[in-house]
Image (tube, helix red, strand yellow):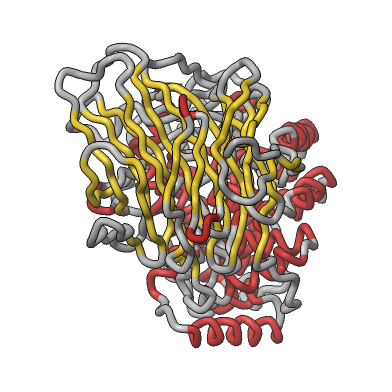
Amino acid sequence: MKREQSMIFRCFSLLAALLLASFGALAAAVGEVQSDQPDVLLTNRKAWEALAARGNPLLLLNAERFRNPQPPFKPPEKVPNTWTYRVIAEQLVPAAYAATAQQSPHRGRADLVAHCVAVIDWLTQQCDANGLWYRREGIGDPNVNRFTLGPLLDAVHMLQTLPAGREAWPRWKDKLDRALDHQRRAFRGEFDWEWVHPEVKYPNHDLYGPLCFWLSAELYGRDEDRQLAQHILRKTTENLLPDGGLHYIGIENESPVYHALNLILIARYATLSRDPVAVKLLQDMANYWPLVLTAEGYPECWSDVWWKQTWGPVWREALVVAAGATGEPRNQWLLWRVLERSAPSDAGMGGIYAAPYWTGVEPGEALPDLFVVRDENIRGVRGRAGSWYFGVCRGRGLRNTFVGGLVTSPTQANPLLAALRGAGVDVLLDAERPNGLWLSEVADRAAVALRPEVAAGLGVRYTLQRSLINGWPTPQTSPSPWQVTQVWRAAGDGIVGLVAVEATADAPAAAVLGRIALGPGAVEAPIGPDAAWRCGPLAVKFFDTFGTASVETVPQYARAPETWWPGVQLRQNLDGGAKSGQRFVYSVWIGPQDAEPPVSMRLLPQDRGWLATWPGGRQAAAVFNPTAAPLIIEVPWSAAAARQWSQDGTSQPLPITGGHVTVSLPPDHCVLLEE
């Protein structure tokens, strides 16, 4: 696992760049070049509708891309890293489709066929005697081999419909056979350096397996490989999360970027194999995008695993697959929100794989303007109030934040106006390093509460952990001398909560940081004692603080410091470390600038929660029992009435006695008190 983490850290930035190149339709690239004007949305929509009136836009764009003569393939003079093989293999697929598909106007064109054959010749020559492109050295990781072999086999399979492909097959089949043999052995668990597992606990990369082995069955006549493809796909279904995601690695939530990739790969396998398990798996993913995306088709990333919070737009091809494979009208509606923010252009491999799922110009069903609903993919709750999206997330350990939100614009091509990427605490052991102890344990104590359609609550307690990537088997974490308690309420009127960290023993530390991660635009410090911090249309108001507050960039995984987005930082430097019992607490409200923040927050003893009061006397409280025993907690209350909302969304009235309400909480429970 340590080797895996090291390789991930070294190659992530490079892989992100290569993904942009190979999946040419990534919306991130589109968002950078389009202006933020409403007429762009209309222009793009009309362009897509005009294509749709002529046929399948993804195939029409492929035909247009290869309309002109294709130059001879020129291999790179030097392969800078092994991800290059993956990029070239993925670029081969749309060319092979244009050269071979019955409906392609370029089928059999000599220059295009010659180009494809030359690319396959080179890629197979680059595969070593062990069937590898990545050889446990240089930049890359074992997934390079699957990401190269999958599209390469697909192109070879396409070329078998033409004489030139059949004639070249003897030159290719032995090398490809060795590559397939390595993958069979990897899926049996024979290599400790491979990232696959016999039980398929890493589906976000293993999903090339079914495609590779199905293609092997077709090319080599091996029925046992067809059975292996079906087996891997069936094991993948065991990773399905309750609301349509897949575990990212082991026990983790899924990330939108990997869900998009998964959809596209499962779709290709389903198209070729007609495997009913794959068809059903795609259908079972129907609810994922309506939970993760805003009404503009922009994904939130705060609930992702901490190393995948990259804040990029979604791939339009993944929405094509979701709309066509699930029949979910919300996915159809979201597809067109994404297309409006993407000028028509050839999508490369993703476009070919998504094309069979194209659903046309039906409007679909819009997301509600207001909702607060459970999302069991993240073990949390999501909500929307107009352009403000918010939520709480228990996740499955190793979290850097349990809350997040964003504000979007329905009229802008790049809709993200501002994001609360997270709120947490970081104990620096070395003042020169960006992170120290800052993550939760794998087995934290967390609970949610729900007031349906109004608000979500969350309480969590854990001891701080170092940077650690979840995986398979699940890594072990052990207690540290730093105990953290967080208690939050997220609603249409903003997110409010407390973060408390306590040294449970004398402990080495250079500084304690409280971090409110914002962006993408600049953060403005408040002017005046009652003013709020600002980041675009988001406002931040502190009640309790420690140390010195300032605008600072917040570290982002595998990204250069000059690209980090800003945030608000509370910093308390420690000379000689921390003493047992020393505490650092902040309470804060974060919300859209047109929402009214509380005028005061009162913290309950022993970090059991807080009570907030708004102008006019309205009150709300979040109460958390992080212990293993039942607790009775007295909460001050001056409003007219109170109801206690529990984790199942039910409520009960609380009598007010002597200016207090009494809350009885079982172990590991959180409740909201609302008027």
In this orientation, does residue 434 appear? yes
Question: Residue at point 42% right, 54% down?
Answer: 599
Is residue 465 placed above or below 239 in the rendered structure?
above
Q: Is residue 356 visible in the rendered structure shown here? A: no
Of 394 and 627, nearer the camera is: 627
Side of 461 relative to 177 (left or right): left
**Left of 608 or right of it: where is 356?**
right
Which residue is situated farthest in the front direction here?
658
In this picture, is 472 found above or below 532? Answer: above
- The outermost residue toward the top is 505
| Residue at image point 65% right, 39% down | 656
Q: Is residue 222 above or below residue 453?
A: above
Image height of 139 relative to 627, above or below: below
Viewer-nearest residue: 483 or 414: 483
Residue 612 drawn at (x, y percent)? 49, 47
Rendering coords of residue 376 (x, y %): 68, 41
Work out which residue is located at the far right of the displayed protein and give it. 276
In percent of width and height, residue 123 lies at 47, 47
Q: Position of residue 361 (x, y in %)?
A: 72, 79
222 or 417, nearer to the observer: 417
From the viewer's perspective, is 303 left or right of 648? left
Residue at left offset 37%, top offset 53%: 541
* Front-most of residues 524 and 562: 524
At 62% across and 21% down in the image, what residue appears? Answer: 631
